[in-house]
Image (cartoon, grey):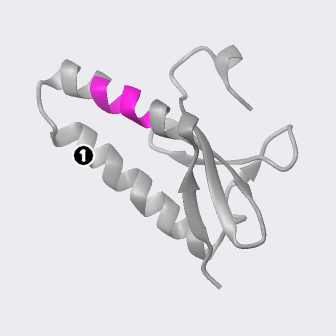
Amino acid sequence: MAKRVIWSARAKRDFITIYAFWLERTGSHRYPLKLRKAFKKATEHLKEQAFLGKMTDIVPFRFMIVGYYKLFYAVTDDTIVILSVFDTRQDSDKTPY
């Protein structure tokens, strides 16, 4: 059974920050929209296979790689909560989970 996906406030802020960065850097919406599409596709996969991502060191958090980004999430009975989006090119000490 497919689960529904909810983006936390932090995950939304993370995505907006990433989108704004690439919009400013490229001067175009093309690449940020491509990232948005990739995140959407990843969450569609999670709806069907919630445990697709790898476990983090902190149970019950998991992550899924999308390009250079990690989508951190948690699974409940009927929901997948996207907790954070992390650019893996940053210092790994900044990883939220």
Three-letter code for the amino acid on which mark 1 is drawn: Leu
Residue at the spot x=34%, y=48% of the render?
36
Indicate left or right for 8 with 25 as reference: right
Pick out the residue farthest to the front. 9
Residue nearer the viewer, 79 or 54: 79
Query: Magenta-highlighted stretch: main secondary structure?
Result: helix
- Which image quadrant: the N terminus? bottom right
Q: Quadrant of residue 88?
A: top right
Indicate left or right for 43 with 51 as reference: left
Residue at the spot x=48%, y=68% of the render?
44
Indicate left or right for 65 with 40 as reference: right
Answer above or below: position of 88 versus 56: above
Answer above or below: position of 91 versus 40: above
Pick out the residue farthest to the bottom. 1
Q: Quadrant of residue 48?
A: bottom right
Within 10 Å of disc 1 (Cα), the crowding (few <14, some 14-19, many 20+) is: some
Residue at the spot x=65%, y=61% of the render?
80
Q: Quadrant of residue 75?
A: bottom right
Residue that badge 1 annotates:
33
Residue at the spot x=47%, y=39% of the render?
12
Q: Position of residue 22 (x, y in %)?
A: 27, 27
Which range is magenta? 15-20
Answer above or below: position of 93 versus 58: above
